[in-house]
């Protein structure tokens, strides 16, 4: 059986591109008659010149701009696009379902009581513009509100204009009504938006709730608090693109011009794991708990930080959050334990101490009661491959 020579032109500096390549390679292993040609430049950047002397049967590419479109077309072989950034290419496109991604984020904010929703993204990327448009439609149809947005260009993040770039984000966030939920078009911008929130003194997630897209773990985990994010299922995008190209190569079959892949899941982390609150005392109390829950703190400590009496604080927690102050402290400690169980191999006694529990047995008791399994069982089920 003759082998098909397939070129992959996908940038891999971000997790989305790496997952697409992973999906393509999975299809190739299943077929066993594909030979993949794949070359990237420094740090995973596209190396389009690698196609100059290439001769093969088909290409899977993220056609990001008209220049790349012209270069791919010059190869005169079947092409499947895995981005959809350039309209009217006549290539089949396999891409993420932007409407479903934006609806996941919109519903996440809605379920937590946020009525003010905003969007931060790129002004020069079609996928980002599509996510903004879909979120705006969601806000009008479901929340009866208009979406606020700030969109920047790639060059705005250059070192020579970095200060102005951060200032723009700070001023924009300061202008938004609080509490507000912000969808970030891509996780790579999560640290930027979070830094602007911290610099402006806004509490995340109580005043500003943040959700990104791509579930790019290095970006999500470097954020403090860690960034919630939609996992769009880019691996399936790559797999379906490979399957589509194979259909074309087999018999020149007609294929759908556009295929949209539904997102996998929204991973809820600390940056959006909160209920919209307008009570400034509760915002201060929750911020203090989030920053200090793993240390020995008391209800009196929290009341002082919130600027109210102990009795008033307890009453507001019950009426607004339907829980006591101590229950709120335990929630933060358990969430911290879940995070460390799934991302570290720290021994349970040390982990319990770092999460604010007096000893391993008390961690096990609280964990079993709240989560339904032991810490050890949770670690086995949720350890993330690295």
Image (cartoon, helix red, strand yellow):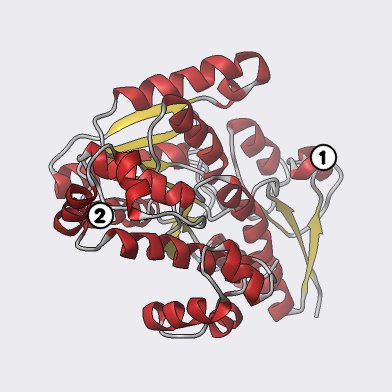
**Spot occupied by residue 273 in the image (x, y as percentages of width and height):** 37, 55
The one nearer the camera, 94 or 14, is 14
Residue 99 in the image: x percent, y percent? Answer: 33, 52
Q: In this view, does 62 lie to the left or right of 35?
A: left
The residue lying toward the viewer, choosing from 63 and 374, is 374
Q: Name the residue under label 2.
A: 112
Quarter containing the N terminus:
bottom right
Can residue 259 be seen?
Answer: yes
Q: Of the residues under marks 2 and 1, which one precedes in the sequence? A: 1
Structural crowding at the residue carrying mark 1, measured as other residues with C-alpha within 10 Å and reported as few (<14), some (14–19) or many (≥20): few
Q: In which quarter of the image is residue 249?
A: bottom right
For label 1, the residue is 42
In depth, the one of 258 and 176 nearer the eye is 176
Report the mark closest to the observer, 2 or 1. 2
Which residue corresponds to the image point at 47% horizontal and 50% vertical from the top-left?
A: 292
What is the distance, in whole Å, between disc 2 and disc 1 at their CAs?
Answer: 42 Å
Residue 34's disc number: none
Is residue 378 shown left or right of residue 249?
left
Q: Is 310 positioned to the left or the right of 284 in the image?
A: left
Most distant residue in the right direction: 53
Circles 2, 1 touching at the beta carbon (< 8 Å): no
> Which image quarter: residue 158?
top right
Write the residue at 51% across / 69% down: 357
Where disc 1 sits, the SS reads: helix
In the picture, the quarter occupied by the C terminus is bottom right
């Amino acid at each position: 059986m003759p082998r098909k020579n397939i070129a992959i032109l996908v940038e891999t500096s971000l997790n989305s591109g790496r997952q697409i390549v992973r999906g393509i390679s999975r299809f190739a292993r299943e077929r066993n008659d594909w030979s993949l040609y794949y070359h990237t430049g420094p740090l995973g950047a596209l190396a389009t010149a690698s196609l100059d002397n290439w001769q093969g049967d088909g290409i899977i590419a993220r056609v990001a701009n008209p220049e790349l479109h012209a270069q791919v077309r010059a190869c005169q072989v079947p092409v499947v696009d895995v981005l959809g950034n350039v309209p009217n290419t006549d290539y089949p496109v396999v891409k993420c379902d932007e409407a479903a991604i934006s609806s996941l984020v919109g519903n996440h904010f809605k379920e937590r009581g946020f009525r003010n929703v905003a969007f931060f993204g790129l002004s020069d990327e079609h996928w980002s513009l599509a996510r903004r448009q879909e979120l705006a439609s969601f806000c009008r149809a479901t929340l009866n509100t208009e979406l606020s947005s700030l969109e920047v260009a790639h060059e705005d993040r250059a070192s020579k204009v970095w200060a102005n770039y951060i200032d723009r984000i700070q001023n924009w966030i300061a202008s938004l009504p609080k509490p507000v939920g912000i969808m970030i078009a891509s996780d790579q911008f999560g640290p930027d938006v979070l830094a602007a929130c911290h610099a402006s003194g806004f509490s995340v997630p109580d005043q500003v709730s943040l959700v990104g897209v791509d579930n790019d773990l290095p970006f999500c985990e470097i954020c403090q608090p860690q960034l919630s994010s939609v996992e769009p299922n880019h691996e399936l995008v790559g797999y379906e693109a490979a399957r589509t190209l194979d259909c074309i190569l087999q018999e020149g079959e007609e294929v759908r011009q556009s295929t949209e892949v539904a997102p996998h899941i929204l991973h809820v982390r600390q940056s959006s794991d909160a209920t919209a609150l307008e009570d400034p005392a509760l915002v201060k109390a929750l911020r203090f708990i989030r920053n200090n829950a793993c240390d020995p703190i008391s209800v009196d400590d929290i009341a002082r930080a919130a600027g109210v009496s102990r009795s008033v604080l307890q009453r507001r927690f019950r009426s607004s959050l339907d829980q006591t102050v101590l229950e709120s402290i335990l929630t933060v400690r358990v969430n911290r334990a879940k995070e460390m169980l799934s991302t570290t191999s720290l021994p349970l006694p040390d982990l319990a101490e770092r999460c604010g529990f007096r000893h391993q047995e008390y961690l096990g008791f609280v964990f079993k009661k709240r989560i339904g399994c032991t810490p050890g069982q949770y670690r086995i089920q949720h350890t993330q491959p690295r």
